[in-house]
Image (spheres, coloured by chain):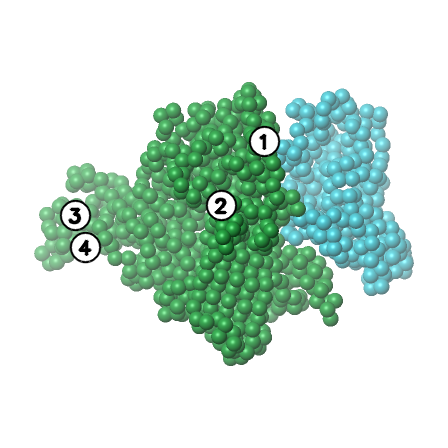
Amino acid sequence: MRYEAPSTTREASALLANAKGKAVVLAGGTDLLARLKSGDIEPDLVVDIKRIDTTQSIKRMASGFRIGASVPCVEIGRSAALKRAWPGVVEAAQLIGSDQIQGRCTIAGNLCNASPAADSVPALIAAGAKASVVGTAGRRTVAVEKITTGPGKTSLGKDEIVESINLPKRPPRTGDAYLRFTPRTEMDIAVVGAGVCLTLNGKGEVSKARVVLGAVAPTAVIVADAANAIIGSRLEDSALAEMAAACEAACNPIDDMRGTIEFRTDVSGVLAKRAAKIAYQRAGGK
Amino acid sequence: MAHDTSYTDQDFKIVGSRPPRPDGIDKVTGRARYGADVSAPGQLVGRVLRSPHAHAKIRKIDTSRAQKLKGVKAVITSKDLPDLTEGNRGNYDILENCMAREHALYDGHAVAAVAAVDEQTARKALKLIKVDYKVLPHVTDVDAAMQDDAPVVQPHIQHDGKPSNICNVSQFGHGDVEAGFAQADVIVEKTYKTEQTHQGYIEPHACLASVGPDGQGELWVTTQGHFTVRNLCASLLGMDIAKLKVTSSEIGGGFGGKTHIWTEPLALALSRKANLPVKLVMSREDVFKGSGPTCSTSMDIKIGAKKDGTVTAASATLRYHAGPHPGPWGMLGGMTAWACYDFENVQSIAYDVLVNRPKVAAYRAPSAPMAAFGVESTMDLVAEAIGMDPVDFRIKNAAKEGTRASYGPTYGPIGIGPTLEAVKNHPHMRARLGKNQGRGMACGFWFNFGGQTCTDLNIGVDGSVNLTVGTVDVGGARASMSLIAAEELGIPYDQVKCNVGDTASLGHNDTTEGSRGTFSSGMATIFAARNAIEEMKARAAKTWEIDIEDIEWRDGAAHAMGMQHSNLAPLSLAEIAGASPGTGGPIAGHNEVVADGAGVSFASHICDVEVDPETGATRVIRYTVVQDAGKAIHPDYVEGQFQGGAAQGIGWALNEEYVYGEDGCLQNPSFLDYRIPVCSDLPFIDTEILEIPNPNHPYGIRGVGETSIVPPLAAIGNAVSSAVGVRLDHTPMSPPRVLKAIKEKQAGG
């Protein structure tokens, strides 16, 4: 196994492009190292992107935020501006693993690991985040929901690396939230996750919404019907019930040791309702 | 020298205080050496190949390609562990469990092992071993395994005259239960299930084995009983007991799971074949699949009572799975089930059942928590049915001194009544509950054990004392033993250094199990110290040239008694020790004993939970343990045992379970999906120590390590019932099970 730690994304991309056999990208390593140790994968090349300048920081720009691909989640939690703008995304990042894991793990890694249960992904999609992807042919910007295509699978080319995750500037009267269900308080994998981002009009009605579920299908699911159910509402019980029903209808989960189909389906609606209420408050709704 | 073991009600000077444990700093700074922390020059890495099938005939194992791989120094299969058990079926079962012979009996059963120069080579070598399996039908569920048409795990085992998975049936009780039920105003009968759990010790099994061409060997190993490891390994490998020296490392948790041998004989056999030391460390997956978790169970519990709260009859039918070999687990469930109570008519029938799962080992009060889940849940149902407070109902029926226990003996002074009274009077019982919160309580029992013990106490010329015990310290025992030695000798705690001796330095000590460590080594330490005192008195007599009868030992010094000796200033322990080279040489005290009379142990727990009715998530928000310790030598470690058992019981009750697939393979062999509670899942666990002296120990000690895991399953079930009105009859009471029960109740009206 060869280990490389290039200092530019271009070099990293070239290493991946020219790799013979299995090549993997290392950022925080909290997924990769566990898989290496268990013998689950035996790559020929590991490309560590932590030495690349452009991956190392959170930048606040006029257009929003740029979160480098090797920024550990603990740093996301320390960014007061990010917390103010996108509290749901920050909460999601701070639910991954445990304090110790968050000292290493990254949201770009969480995305590219392509687990259906990734905590940060529904929150990022709800917030309208985009991935900045660098390959040998150059850079492209891709909506986060287009990255994961199935469990363990992404749309990234062999030579491509997610260099940063970009969040937009938060629109006025907008709030987001993420909740997940796990049997334990930490060191656990979401059985269901729900990210909600919504914008209110001047009358306190939901004018725009995004409802995204995790761990209930092969990838995170954007539930348009759930969003439509609350648009125009002030989250009255009937609107929330309709939203929950839409979430349950959108679920296509597996039955496994982490949760039954029935349980995941039921809880998806419960969490979406609770997340929507938090997001509504954060957007200034009363 | 024979010593009187009976309780003497002495006033303690040091026992009962809370000094820091001698192994504490090393443990928190990382200097302590655990099973995997020792290396030898030239050591190899050992790894084990395990069966991917729940049940299979092993037609052939081809190790030739692995053996040819560069860096591989030894490959072993069952052929390298010939059967030397000479008809001892128990030892044969152990041998077969350590390494499959004709059949792989569970997913994870060891089938071969390699020793190589590094881990990568060892891993590669495992992949080169080709095992030709013929997959056989399997059974993993205890109820399914009892059916007539179930696949048979061990064809030599018969029940009702034909091959069967039922390997033991035991029965306990007295009176006439049918007549008793006929007198009852209310009868509650219910079936329960508990899923299999693992002890979940943080340190995986690990050892370093070295066997030379002269047939002598050494083994460094994490274990609760190095003498047991020595005797079993020597027997299976055909070595003389005296030629295998076993040293126990610091232990990162055992809870019964480290009372047996697993990969240790494989490491020794690899070392013998390679003629180099072999270090063998289990992965967590190996631990889940190839060590000794506890049983899953299925139980029918029936209790009848009069309206005044008198129980007229109680019966239990218990079905415990044993893994691929017979064990005493159902029997222990049957013995413990009704032990808290004084019932006129009581019975338990217990079945041990073979399944294609790993060998069951002890897990902290083995078998008692499951039976208590069924019994204590049903006790609450009966109390509810007759409209009586559940604590009062238990107090009315509690066993007391003179009660004939359901499993046979007549109790001496016991703590069940006092723990129940303490619960009744505890402020926890009166604390207010919020929305979706509920409170439950439950009782528990464990026998405790004494057994063979051998201890040495050596006094240095500076007056410091080395105490060498042979019971592995799993819960702060070195601190407790040091307190006892200091108490007896009349010297400060810091002047005693307690070590756990290796198998070459002491006579046989039984394994630290059955909560016997402090009870038995405490007894041997008292007597060893008293023997040393006799010797010091003799030295003083020699020095003073007076009769030993005129000398008494107090406050750490020999005192000459009587007016005629009033000119003689006391001789301190340090003075006598300092003079010892000239008065007869080193001063030591020694004791070997079979410590009989371990006092039975009882506990009552109170638990508050909050249940999220929309997700079924249950959080324990307050927890109190009340338990009888006999005498708490070091109260910190007694409380630690109370808290640790409760924490494990909470995990068992709420989330922990072995999940098997249709293929009979374990689906969750990792701490990610086998969910033991993390710190943030648990509240502070409050404790109250009661001290009802054990009449059979000079200090009144009872074992305290196990009983605390017995009540939590039922206490939580009772609390969930009080919070959301649903009765869970299946552990773990995981969110999907609780939510399903809530929804069924809502649907039902």
Residue at image location 72% in from the left, 61% down from the top: B614
- Residue type at numbered disc 2: His
Camera-near label (1 vs 3) is 1
Neighbour tally class for label 1: few under 14, some 14-19, many 20 plus, Cα within 10 Å: some
Q: Is residue B270 above or below residue B553?
A: above
Residue B435: x and y in percent read 67, 67
Q: Are marks 2 and 4 in contact (CB under 8 Å)?
A: no
Horizontal side of B42 relative to A38 (left or right) equals: left
Which chain wears green?
B
Give the number of the disc on residue B538: 3
Question: Which color was chain A given?
Answer: cyan
Residue B105: x and y in percent read 55, 41
> Which callout, 2 or 1, points at the residue further toward the start of the chain?
1
Q: Are marks 2 and 3 in contact (CB under 8 Å)?
A: no
Q: Are marks 1 and 4 in contact (CB under 8 Å)?
A: no
Seen from the viewer's position, the closer of residues B311 and A162 is B311
- Residue type at numbered disc 1: Val
> Which callout, 1 or 3, points at the residue further toward the start of the chain?
1
Residue A119: x and y in percent read 73, 46
Any part of residue B600 in sight = yes
Q: Quadrant of residue B446?
A: bottom left
| Gap between marks 2 and 3 measured at Cα | 62 Å
Q: Is residue B743 above or below residue A225?
A: below
Q: Are marks 2 and 1 in contact (CB under 8 Å)?
A: no
Q: Does dot 3 land on a helix, a strand or a loop?
A: helix
Q: For mark 1, name the chain.
A: B
Say whether mark 4 and mark 1 are on the same chain: yes
Give the labeled residue for mark 1: B131
Seen from the viewer's position, the closer of residues B490 and B345 is B345
- Residue type at numbered disc 3: Ala
